[in-house]
């Protein structure tokens, strides 16, 4: 089955094979060595200029994101959340669940954030940090993280980036950020079950002084004790292998490969007269959101494609009825995308 949903993704045989490296106790030196390797490879891939540390934890991307959101504020702080999709809104929901003071700067789901409104929100004296989603998976919109980060840093605020669906698919300069959240099973091409936060080293010291709002998901706990709880050992093997593959391919080359795949698909969608949800300048390298063709429901489209070996993805939230999404993340080839366009023609009745 070719997965054209935005994670979990198809992985290489080499990554799958890593699951079988053997049984291992996480309190043994071999696990410490594995974790050191994953952390070093994450930093080599995404923070090559140094100055960051990597916290790796077991759970999906949301676990790592919730750890970051609930660790970033002092007892007196407020978080500004930039929201233009399901995932920005989810960060606000996390702050709400933890009863953290927060200000949400909302904009339409198909538009970039209102940077003036973000700047005004950042000016409040109790604001300590801003959270922004790098790649809004809801629509495939790439947010202007560098601009938000520049405004935040000029006011001395921390910058938390949800790059769960962005890292290794779209370029991100982590040097503008303080905390960057990622996951194993999207553009990194590992398996679901491990996620991570890249934290600026100096900021990690500050986080250690903040209240611990969760026993399981506290970044300070992970910084003190690298393996506080039982990790998904075999998924960690697979992540280590996926990171080795990523470094062999090169992050910039991976980003270019995804951009080329998206370009191939988009040219095909255009030729077929499908309606794009976003204008070209807002689109990421890894998801294309399209209007459902007239007279064709999502179920029919999905099931027809699945019969032919391809899984596409439904719209979310208020866009659920109108759109569908095609991701191009994972261990896939040009031939896979070309075959998908042929299958799409069959389902569209062309
Ligand atoms: C931008 C973004 N943030 C957070 C998440 C949540 O990640 P997970 O489903 O791995 O918990 C996703 C998942 O698609 C995402 O795309």
Image (cartoon, helix red, strand yellow):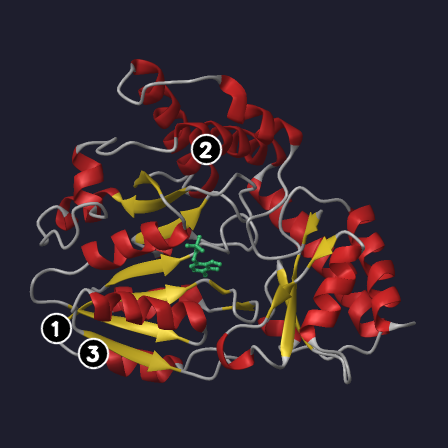
Q: Secondary structure at mark 2?
A: helix
**Label 3 Cα neighbours within 10 Å, binned few <14 / some 14-19 / many ≥20:** few
In the displayed structure, 91 sits above or below 198; it is below
Would you say the residues marked 3 and 2 are in contact, meaning their CB atoms lie under 8 Å apart? no
Residue sitting nearer the eye, 134 or 11: 11
Q: Earlier in the sequence, mark 3 or mark 2?
A: 3
User: Which callout, 3 or 2, points to the residue nearer the camera?
Assistant: 2
Q: Secondary structure at mark 1?
A: loop
The quadrant in which the C terminus is found is: bottom right
User: Which callout, 1 or 2, points to the residue nearer the camera?
Assistant: 2
The answer to which quarter of the image holds residue 294 is bottom right
Which residue is the site of mark 2? Answer: 235
In the displayed structure, 91 sits above or below 22; it is below
Which residue is the site of mark 1? Answer: 126
Residue sitting nearer the eye, 240 or 259: 240
Q: Earlier in the sequence, mark 1 or mark 2?
A: 1
């Amino acid at each position: 089955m070719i997965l054209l949903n935005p994670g979990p993704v198809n992985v290489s045989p080499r990554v799958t094979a890593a699951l079988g490296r053997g049984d291992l106790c996480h309190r043994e030196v071999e696990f410490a060595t594995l974790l050191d390797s994953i952390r070093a490879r994450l930093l080599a891939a995404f923070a090559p200029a140094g100055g960051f540390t990597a916290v790796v934890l077991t759970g999906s991307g949301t676990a790592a994101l919730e750890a970051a959101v609930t660790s970033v504020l002092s007892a007196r702080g407020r978080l500004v959340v930039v929201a233009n999709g399901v995932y920005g809104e989810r960060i606000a929901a996390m702050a709400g669940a933890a009863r953290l003071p927060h200000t949400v700067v909302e904009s339409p789901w198909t538009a970039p954030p209102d940077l003036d409104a973000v700047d005004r929100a950042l000016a409040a004296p109790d604001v300590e940090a801003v959270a922004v989603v790098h790649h809004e998976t809801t629509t495939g919109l790439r947010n202007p993280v560098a601009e938000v980060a520049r405004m935040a840093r000029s006011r001395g605020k921390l910058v938390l980036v949800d790059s769960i669906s962005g890292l290794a698919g779209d370029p991100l300069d982590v040097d503008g950020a303080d905390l960057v959240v990622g996951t194993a099973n999207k553009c990194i091409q590992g398996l679901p079950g491990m996620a991570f936060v890249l934290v600026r080293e100096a900021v990690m010291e500050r986080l250690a002084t903040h209240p611990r709002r969760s026993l399981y998901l506290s970044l300070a706990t992970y910084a003190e004790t690298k393996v506080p709880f039982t990790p998904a050992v075999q998924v960690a093997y697979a992540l280590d292998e996926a990171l080795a593959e990523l470094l062999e391919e090169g992050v910039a080359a991976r980003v270019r490969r995804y951009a080329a795949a998206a370009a191939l698909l988009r040219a095909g969608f255009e030729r077929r007269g499908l309606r794009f949800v976003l204008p070209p300048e807002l689109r990421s390298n890894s998801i294309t959101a399209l209007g459902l063709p007239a007279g064709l429901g999502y179920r029919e489209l999905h099931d027809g494609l699945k019969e032919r070996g391809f899984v596409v993805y439904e719209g979310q939230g208020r866009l659920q009825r109108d759109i569908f999404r095609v991701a191009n993340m994972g261990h896939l080839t040009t031939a896979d995308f070309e075959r998908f366009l042929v299958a799409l023609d069959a389902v569209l009745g062309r």
